Image (tube, rainbow, N blue to C red):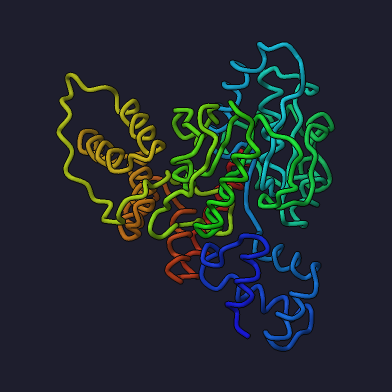
Amino acid sequence: MTLASIAHYLRTTSGLNEASLGSGVLERAVRRRQLETQTPTIDAYHSLLLASPEELQALLDDVTVPETSFFRDPGVFSALTEAIVADWLARPALRTLRILSAPCSTGEEPYSIAMALLDAGLPADRFSIDAIDINSRVLATARRAVYGNGAFRGRDLAFRERYFHRAAHGWELNTQVRECVRFRHGNLLDPQLASHTYDVVFCRNLLIYFDPPTQAQAMVRLDALVANGGLLFLGPAETFLTRHTAFESLGRPMSFGFRKTEARTAVRTPNPPATPRAPRRDRSVVHAPAANPQPRTSAHVAPAAPIARDEAPSVDALFDRAETLANDGRLREAAELCRACIEREGPSVRGYFLLGVVADALGDGEQALSYFRKVIYLQPGHEQALLHLALLKRQRGEVERANHFERRARSVGRRDGEA
């Protein structure tokens, strides 16, 4: 019996693809579980895994430990509230708005959804949020709703003052927000997941853990879960999966949001990039635009046409445009525009960061590393660039360097949370 048999069992029972976890993650988790269960051989552990649903759950809990925070990717929540204000608040209160967060991790995402909707003026009795996850440990944390400073990142923490109060071990969420969310154990691929459709589904940074056949299966499930006209939010590296489906982009930069059209409901198997890339064991961290399914060639692009200063738009407007292109999967055009901006204005944190995520999405890891190093040279505390460097180093098996960048990123997150 080999580790491959255990990996196959995880894939068939949960959809989890071993390659997405990073080098050695599953092997180390199995060794830990062998020690915990006192099974001396991998063959004995495999037999235990097949016979014990509880042990299967324990192994899944070990390999799916996420790191997340409140209001991660602000563009997502801006797009959500804009759509709800336009499409829902004006309607008569015929029923509640139904929302699904899957996976919900330790609760930051569904609670952020609730706070965003309350801030947008939607009364608590007008919406309900179902939150599911396959990891029982994170669900316990979510239900407890007490968070340390690391869960609060970024500069705008006004929501913490409105919805949290100091507790013995951190910040405790108030009852109003907690009652908006129902947590339960579940798997997106389970056909019994829900008996109705949802107006909004968040499924961010889960599908990159699946192999292509399972990704196609998951998209069929999402098509069944999202009501016609409803919204779907994916992770940035997953948007290519909506090609040839009923989902159309919202057109909001860095929102990675889609609306399900009524005209098309059939979902065809998507064509993924040649080698799907996935972030580290963090289902809510990596900010990479989706790659078009095209040959994986160098991320280098032809030199951009010079931009005349006397007639050029502002550099911020150009970077906004580049982000829109990247969000639409037009990666090489986005890179070309970034390079033109840098040629015009000089070194840019924003430009180098976007070039890094585009290069990574195109499969050019060397170029991505170069761009992210330039970002942290200009801004040593750039959390997302540090996380991307950690990811790239871990994929190369450089565990110590990956840990180094992750520690730096966590330190930045803690400082931001305390600011």
Quarter assignment of residue 389:
bottom left
Which residue occupies 63% across, 44% down?
69
Quarter assignment of residue 164:
top right
Q: Tell me if residue 371 comes above or below residue 179 in the rendering.
A: below
Quarter assignment of residue 277:
bottom left
Which residue occupies 35% across, 47% down?
358
Which residue occupies 58% across, 41% down?
416
Q: Tell me if residue 239 comes above or below residue 401 in the rendering.
A: above
Coordinates of residue 244 in the picture (x, y in percent): 44, 40
Q: Nearer the viewer, residue 120 or 59?
A: 59
Coordinates of residue 148 in the picture (x, y in percent): 72, 47
Left-right relation of 74 to 299: right
Q: Which of 319 and 251 is in front in this view?
A: 251
Which residue occupies 61% across, 65% down?
11
Q: Tell me if residue 3 comes above or below residue 410 in the rendering.
A: below
Residue 23 appears in the figure: yes
Left-right relation of 105 to 180: left
Coordinates of residue 381 in the picture (x, y in percent): 47, 47
Residue 407 appears in the figure: no
Q: Tell me if residue 48 comes above or below residue 408 in the rendering.
A: below
